[in-house]
Structure formats: structure tokens, C-alpha cells
Image: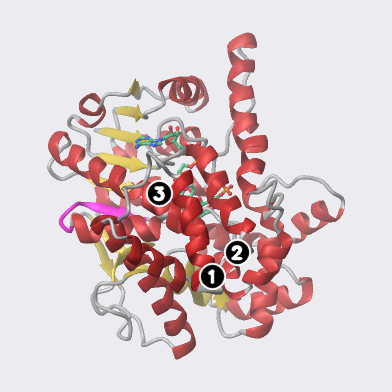
Amino acid sequence: MIITIVGGGSTFTAGIVKSIALREKDLGVSEIRLYDVDKERQDKVGVVVDWVLKEDVKTNIKLTLTTNKEEAYREASFIFAQMRVGKYAMREQDEKIPLRHGCVGQETCGCGGLAYGMRTIHPMIDLIDDVEKYAKKDYWILNYSNPAAVVSEACRKLRPHARIINICDMPIAIVDMIAQCLHIDNYKDITYDYFGLNHFGWFTSMEYKGRDILAEMKEYVKKHKILLPEKHIEAIENFRKTENRHANESWIHVWKAVYDMMEMFPEYLPNTYLNYYLLSKESVEHSNANHTRANEVMETREKTLFEGVDHYLKTGEISEKAFYAGAHGDWIADLAVALKNDTKERFLVIVENRGTIPNMPYDAMVEVPAYIGKNGPEVISQNPIPLFYQGLMMQQVNSEKLLVEGCMEQSYEKVLQAFTLNKTVPSASVAKAILDEMIEANKGFWPELK
Ligand code: NAD
Ligand code: G6P
Ligand code: MN
């Protein structure tokens, strides 16, 4: 059984491979293939991956590194996708261009997310076509590639029969954080309900062994004015780094924003990403247009990984801290286990609505709970959602749909409508100024707009 990781040179590859390796028997996996368009980057990551498989987890899984699509996908059963089209250099542009115009600068939300979407739609469609050509007929593509909202809409529209499931690790990272806040040993023991779009949703209930922990978290967040465990709060107060990648640097502002959002709208617990839409002014004020999250990531996660590789090659010593392992890899590997072994375990997935949320369009891509078995997600139907949330979601979903249509039709006007409709943009003239600058910055990545 072959698993191919697309974006093999990602900073997350070693962690994902570790999660796969720890599930070697459940997955029946015999080979992992890494595929990337950047050979040099992937070869370096491959050094750590090889160590994870041979020395760390001690498996017999074969490792293949390739930049050849046929070699990558031939007879593969699972394809884990995590491509970052344009890499961190373009993420920097996605974040910095909108900020220069006074708008939210974020890789997946607002104009930055739309720009990243325009770069990623065609490479993701190419990926589906290549997989259809070479992989096993009952393949599954599990997609992390961002912006997942736009990518999933494009796949739905352009390749409706593709066996692809789009996922996000943020809700589970929030659940993990909540477990730590409440001293719950294993976040997997927490059950929850959730509705929304990708990076745009709300927890509506949360339970642990019969306890209403959503109510407990409302109290917790009120008291601490942040959704982070006390040990992280203490570390932040003492200017120490926390070990959690979601609780370092600019992420701290995001967890504080959860408090501000819940003070105003205490009904549900919001996904952290909603701060970019509900508190966009504050997000811009807090940002530094000359040094954004892309810079932080390059200076921390990426640097640590590649320095770790160099150190290992020189000395034969490797530190677990060189790469990130945990919930992110476990989430995608567990999803593959559920598909392979028909476990009917519950996951959050991004799927076509088809009536799941009765007052959202049939063809909106929504993020909702589903039971996962060998035939894919069996989605759990939801109650109609209150107007406030539905209105926010409609605005966002239409912005994303217009972007995908604009990309396919190469329509400047539709893409401008997508930017204008986005809640992070105050005026059509600002949308136009950002779009025009982004067209320049994305030459060679975006389809030409007419
Ligand atoms: P990264 O830049 O370190 O890795 C991405 C890799 O993708 C690079 O090695 C790059 O060369 C490669 N790539 C670019 N275009 C490609 C193509 N067309 N085909 C194959 N490979 C290609 O980025 P990262 O920070 O490690 O993140 C990887 C991806 O995972 C990003 O898309 C990121 O947004 C996504 N991600 C998603 C979630 C989620 O919740 N859905 C969580 C974490 C990361
Ligand atoms: C969360 C989101 C991902 C996003 C990531 C960015 O995990 O769910 O979609 O890619 O954060 O994290 P970073 O550390 O790269 O800013
Ligand atoms: Mn995500």
C-alpha cells in the first residue's frame, strides 16, 4: 500500500510521516513517496523523513523521493496533498500587499487567501488529473493544501467525481488547546458539534465524559481573556516560547481575539480565523506590514528544520525539536485509517452542503462533522443556523465562489467582485488597488485576467 505526499518538501512532511509510521499496521502501508516540484528542498526534508522511518519509529516502510508525477502516483492508494504554490516568498506577498492598503494580511483569509487561491486552483486540478491517470482506481486524495475553502470549491466545480476530501487542522488544534486548558489528558475524548466554512466556523457544543465543556470554556476564556492553557499564558508572560506551534509569536493575538469575539457573541465558540473578519481593524492595527507571519515562519519553523538537517548530516545527531509532530499529522493519518478500515469515526470535513445546513446553498462547500467509512464521509445534518452566522457565511462563500468562477473564466470583473465582496475589504476602490498590485506580484502564477 502506497501513500504519496505531495509537497514533500513541506515543513510538515516529517511530522506527517511520523504519524503514518506510528499507524503502519492499521494502514498496511509499505511505501511512502514524496513528490515535490522543488527537488533540493524535498531532498533535504527526505533526510529527516528517512531518519523518522528507520531510526525514530523503526519501520520497514520503503521511502521514495521523486519529482516525476508518474513515479509519484503509480498504484498509490492515498495521496496526502500539502502544496504551497509560490512558497513562503509568495505567502509574504499575500500578507503584505493587503496590509499596505490597510486590509487584513493573512495567507488564507481576505485578499491574501483569494490570491493564494488563484495560484493553487490549477495545480490542484492537475494533481487530480495525474492521480486519476496513475493511481489505484479507489484512491483517496486527502487535501491540506490551502486555501482549502477555495481549493475545495474549485475541485467540486471542475472535478466533481474526484475522490478528494479537503480538511483543516485548526478545529482540532482548538480542541487540543481546550483539552490542555481543562487538563483533559487526551483531546480525542472530547466530542463536539461544529458548523461553518473552512477557517470560518463555530463550535456549537462540546462535551467530555458528560461535562458541558463549552460552558466551562466560556468561563475560562472570560477569566483569562485568552483561549490558551495556563502554562502557555505563564510562558508568554515570561517571554518564553511555548512548544505549541499555534501558541507562538503572532498566533498569541489570535487566541486573545477569541476572548474579544466571545465577549460580543457568547453563543458559540468561534474558530480563531474569524478574528480576521469580525475584528479586521484590530488585526490590521496589530500587524507589521514589514514583518508578517511568513517572515516568522521562515525565521522559526523553516529555519529550525533545515538547520536540523544540516546538523544531522554533519554530526549524525538529530533533535526531535527539528520538526513538528503531533495533531496535524495525526488528523490526516487517522482520517486515512478510518477510510481504509471503514471505522465510521467522526471527523470534521469540508464537503458540498447538499442540504446539510438547510439554510445554506446546496452547492456551498461547508465544514461539518461526518462519520468516515470506506465510501467516504457520511455527513451529519445540521439545524438551520441563525441569521447572523448565515449572513456572514453567505458573504464569504459568494466571495470564494466568485473567485473560482473568475479564475476559470479569466474574468477580471468577477475576481474584482470576489475581492470587493470579502468582508475584510472596506471599499471597491481598495479591492481594485489590491487586486491590481496582486496581478503584478503573481505574474507566472495566476491565469491572465481579461
Ligand atoms: P512549505 O512551503 O514548507 O511546503 C510546501 C511545499 O509544496 C514546498 O516544498 C513546495 O516546493 C511544494 N510545492 C509547491 N507547488 C507545488 C506543486 N504544484 N506540486 C507539488 N509541490 C508543490 O509550506 P508549509 O508551511 O509546510 O505548508 C504546506 C501546505 O500545507 C500549505 O499549503 C499550507 O497552507 C498547508 N497547511 C494546511 C493546513 C490545513 O489546515 N489545511 C495546516 C497546515 C498547513
Ligand atoms: C492552521 C491552519 C492552517 C494553516 C496554518 C498556518 O493550522 O488550519 O490552514 O496553514 O495554521 O500555520 P503557520 O504556522 O504556517 O502560520
Ligand atoms: Mn486550516
Label 2 within 8 A of ligand 2 by Cβ: no
Of the two numbered discs 1 and 3 on the same chain, state the one appearing first in sequence: 3
Question: In this rendering, which labeled residue sits more in front, label 1 or label 3?
Answer: 1
Cα–Cα gap, marks 3 and 2? 26 Å
Check the image and report above or below for 81 versus 358. above
Closer to us: 88 or 55: 88
In the rendered image, which residue does mark 3 sit on?
144
Q: Amino acid at mark 2?
A: Cys
Seen from this angle, which residue lies furthest right?
A: 238
Q: Quadrant of the C terminus?
A: bottom left
Cα–Cα gap, marks 1 and 3? 26 Å
Q: Amino acid at mark 3?
A: Tyr
Give the x, y percent position of residue 355.
25, 80
Label 3 within 8 A of ligand 1 by Cβ: yes
Element type at mark 3: loop
Q: Name the residue at 55% across, 69% down.
A: 424
Give the x, y percent position of residue 231.
77, 55
Q: Amino acid at mark 1?
A: Val
Give the x, y percent position of residue 280.
62, 70
Cα–Cα gap, marks 2 and 1? 6 Å
Of the two numbered discs 3 and 2 on the same chain, state the one appearing first in sequence: 2
In the rendered image, which residue does mark 2 sit on?
103
Residue range (magenta): 160-166
Give the x, y percent position of residue 361.
28, 79
Element type at mark 2: loop
Q: Which mark is residue 425?
A: 1
**In the image: residue 288, left or right of residue 29:** right
| Residue 420 seen in this snapshot | yes
